[in-house]
Image (cartoon, coloured by chain):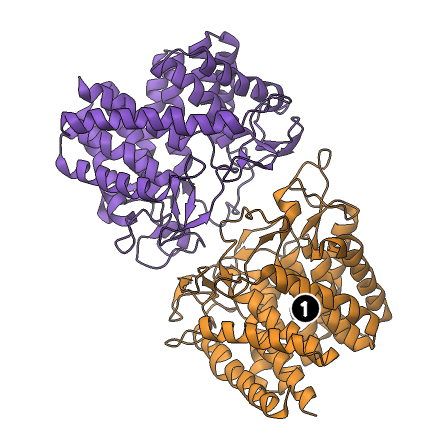
Chain colours: A orange, B purple
Amino acid sequence: MNPKRIHELRAYFRDRLINDTLAFWVEHAIDTEMGGFTFFLDRQGRTLSTDKPMWSHGRAAWLFARLYNELEPRKEWLDLSRHAVDFLRRFGFADDGRVFYSVTRDGRPLRRRRYLFAETFAIIGLAEYARAAGDAGALGLARSTLELVRDHLAHARLPPKVNPATRRTRGHSMAMIQVNTLQVLRQADPDPKYDSMIDSAIDELFRCFVHPERAALFETVGPEGELLLDLPEGRCINPGHAIETAWFLMAEGRRRGDRHLIERALPILEWSLDLGWDKRDGGLFSFVDIDGHQPDQLEWDMKLWWPHTEAIYATLLAHHLTGENRYLEWFEKVLAYAIGHFPDPEHGEWFGYLHRDGTVALDLKGNMWKGLFHLPRQQLNCYLLLTAMAK
Amino acid sequence: MNPKRIHELRAYFRDRLINDTLAFWVEHAIDTEMGGFTFFLDRQGRTLSTDKPMWSHGRAAWLFARLYNELEPRKEWLDLSRHAVDFLRRFGFADDGRVFYSVTRDGRPLRRRRYLFAETFAIIGLAEYARAAGDAGALGLARSTLELVRDHLAHARLPPKVNPATRRTRGHSMAMIQVNTLQVLRQADPDPKYDSMIDSAIDELFRCFVHPERAALFETVGPEGELLLDLPEGRCINPGHAIETAWFLMAEGRRRGDRHLIERALPILEWSLDLGWDKRDGGLFSFVDIDGHQPDQLEWDMKLWWPHTEAIYATLLAHHLTGENRYLEWFEKVLAYAIGHFPDPEHGEWFGYLHRDGTVALDLKGNMWKGLFHLPRQQLNCYLLLTAMAK
């Protein structure tokens, strides 16, 4: 990438992060009365539901602390991270140590889920905040929550969705999220044990989900990574998810100076872009069937914001790590599509859900899944990487 | 409706039912080797998954027996109903009497769900088959499954989705499906107790879900029917669902000669058509927010086949029962949209899932939800009603 473009994009991502994304959420999402954040927001930032998803609080706690730790130590960002952490600590944890999926505006428990993502996002929020605030209690809670997650996984304590006597499967999400969760925790809590835990998760990813013979990373496989091509879920590729995994792996390789790991991660990125890109209308599909059937998810052809943010950062990182031009071309292509379709010119921030043809399907700004995470993380990560590239 | 149009439509629905819908499923869906039906079919009728949803077996058992009972006593239809009933009896029931959500091709249990729809569809399949075949065992199983459903509902035996200490809600689906389930069972098992059970379900529908002051039937309300307008689920209108309820109620009024019940059902139909119709592109939305927000379901603006089939029969029935022209206009409008968009001109049957603009989003013919039910039921019901109108 030429220095002019680096300079221009660096300024662009920083400006959009602070003056658009953060500005929108800080204006509309903070609940000063009852604590925490209101994430269900319409196009203009008005509240659609006062229920509070807990994983979004973990993510927001992480983001604001990360900004404080990596961009600038602004007191306002530390305070906002603490605002999320306080709500999470007071109302997020059940007596058994698990984290609720959602609570009411005033913190009364609504739902639990079968899976452990509320827990993993609580861990990154608490850990990044602990690093920013020097809060040993938050770090301790992150550590004990990790122990709970590992205990549940090791002993399969959660009720399985499918009868395990009939069919056992393994899902990509949990291996993937462990890599990122442990990366964040390691930075707050330097202990070599996290490296070996990350090694195990990376090993599981390559052993079970990455299939070079089919040029794809699969979402659901058999217990030992067997392909389950008779099942729609066994044929399912989630390009955004696979791309996110690719950059978690590249980031690990970059940190360790491990070229081999980077070389193994790059094909995942390329396969997923090739499989996921919509050659007719542009943008990344939400789901693809490896055998060319139509996926069975109703939203398979919708263009969602988050796979695009993941692809923007992953391609920029791949270009930086390899110097190869094809990653730069992909970066510019995905970025052009994203900037051309997702930003809301009237009320700021991004739309999250487009039809296949790029028209807006849902104009909300926040819901159970869309909050302070993928977009600002991408803007921050791109800014930091471009800063390194500028040197 | 003028006699010429009645004659023309009567022939049309009968032809499409037998030569298109049934022909497609009979050609592609019967598993002669392992029993039961393969419902996951692509556009051409090729298998997308061999897993077997049990509620679809209850529905198919009902449909074929209904054809035998109401259209013609063709042995082939009785045999096909038995084919579904046999699979349901052998593999559908857990030891505790509940019905599995899905099993493998050879009948090994895969999933159970929190709700009781697999049970209610098993009841209608078994009951209609019992009436066709004079099978007392099937009727007994339908009866005992009804007892199980009523016991679960009376004692709230299923784990709630939301913590009931925090929020208690009531869903429209279960009251609605009881009306139809009991109507079918009553026909096979004439016992006055079913009338009073139907009265209770109808009472619940009007007391809790039908809100004339908001001109809508709501999907989710408080325990006593309180509106929950602060919550997306409390603002959610499902036009197809409400229209289906409207014709269940009209059918009950027609059977009983109860004009008052019919008069109370008609506004539900009108509200739902007014709320659900897409004035820009035509067709019925899948979800609408009563306060004009955007619904939070990703598929809110997609046009699904089943709300259209429900609206076609409901408007025809309303026209027949009232003689009013506006229902005839709605009937012709919905039918024209449906015929113009859903049928697959190349491989037969209907597409199930269109984008808002009417283009095909998923070209599959069958999945966990789309099987031998809404479309053939509508075609059969319209044919039978037009036959009555012709007299």
On what subunit does the disc labeled 1 rest? A
Q: Secondary structure at mark 1?
A: helix
- Does A197 appear above or below B88? below
Residue B341 position by quadrant: top left
| Residue bearing mark 1 | A124
- Does A295 appear above or below B387? below
Is residue A27 or residue A230 the one in the foreground? Answer: A230
Is residue A83 or residue A302 the one in the foreground? Answer: A302
Q: Which residue type carries mark 1?
A: Ile
Would residue A247 be found to the left or right of residue B191 on screen?
A: right
Is residue B169 or residue B9 the one in the foreground? Answer: B9
Would residue A339 be found to the left or right of residue A3 on screen?
A: left
The outermost residue toward the front is: B346
Residue A145 is at least partly visible in this image: no
Give percent across and percent down for residue B332. Answer: 22, 38
Give percent across and percent down for residue A286. Answer: 55, 58
